[in-house]
Amino acid sequence: FPYRTLCRSLGREKPPGQAAKLFGVLFVFVLSSGLLAAPKTPLPKRIVLEKYKRGYTVYTPSGLQEGERYPALIWLHPLGSSMNTRFRRDWWNGLKERRFFMVLPESADRRAWTDADAPYLLALAADLPRKFAINRRKLTLFGCQAGGQMGFHLVRRFHRRFCSLITMAAYPVSGMKEPVVSLPSRRARRTLSILMIVGTADNGRMFCRQAAEQLEAQGFAVGLIEVPEASQIYMPSVKPRVLSWLEKVAADERPSVELLEEERNAREALAEA
């Protein structure tokens, strides 16, 4: 290390004393060792489920405590694209701040989810707590469009596997020619919360409203966010309200009555307008 050259470049005629020299050496050591560097978020990890010949990618938040288990959010992409890059950019910072794992599955058909994907997603849900510090009772599904339809399908048939469902531009219906509202079993009301996000210009909004009213009457924790003038699109503008919902999930709380009242007031204000 050109110590005397450095002193001359700084305008010093003589090198400092032994104490200052020792400090300088220690400072260079700390910089080179990376001790002052900001903690890095763990890199994403891809896990392969051999039986299904596909895998899933997991993003792990930093600062986890040994022996503790944490919630996870499973992204179910919309029709035509995984949107993984966009979803990661929009949501990962908020999720990792709340100590959520983020899970990106892979549909068999990259364009959409089908009923045939259900066994793979259930295997994924069972695999997560074995390989990561994830609480098996704190798995949230977040589905957009076709991914949301997949989410409704899963909680109707396997509600014990998931604690929360968030859907965006999706409808809780069954039947294509004559769709009718189709809901999870009433037995799930103590363990499952459902948050639906739909645009006011979306023709399927009436199904979400009917479902919200029926679920609330049955004792479910349910929320409905209606985005003005939106229809059948990805709506990241609702992120603060979704993260607030997830905070309650993480704290092992059902979303509060106040949040539901806020959503109800917002719906009534839109109706009056």
Image (tube, helix red, strand yellow):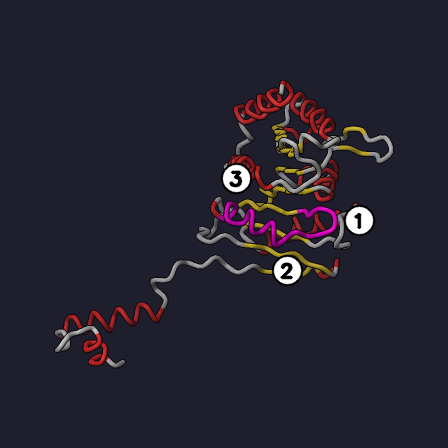
Q: Residue at x 22, y 80 (%)?
A: 5
Query: Along the horizontal axis of the image, is 4 left or right of 43?
Result: left
User: What crowding class fits label 1: few (fewer than 14 Cα within 10 Å), some (14-19), or many (20 or more)?
Assistant: few
Query: Along the horizontal axis of the image, is 110 left or right of 42?
Result: right
Q: Which mark is residue 250?
A: 3
N-term-proximal mark, 1 vs 2: 2
Label 1 sits on what residue type?
Ala
Q: Which mark is residue 47?
A: 2
Residue 115 drawn at (x, y percent) = 79, 45
Q: Which mark is residue 116?
A: 1
Label 3 sits on what residue type?
Ala
**Could you say whether the residue bearing mark 3 is in a helix, strand or loop?**
helix
Q: Quadrant of the N terminus?
A: bottom left
Label 2 sits on what residue type?
Ile
Bounds of the magenta span?
76-96
Residue 134 drawn at (x, y percent) = 56, 49
In depth, the one of 235 and 210 nearer the eye is: 235
Q: Is residue 252 visible?
A: no
Residue at far top of view: 272
Quick check: 34 above or below 69? Answer: below
Query: Along the horizontal axis of the image, is 273 left or right of 185?
Result: left
Q: Quadrant for residue 228, please give it.
A: top right
N-term-proximal mark, 1 vs 3: 1
Quick check: 30 above or below 98? Answer: below
Does the magenta segment cover residue 158?
no
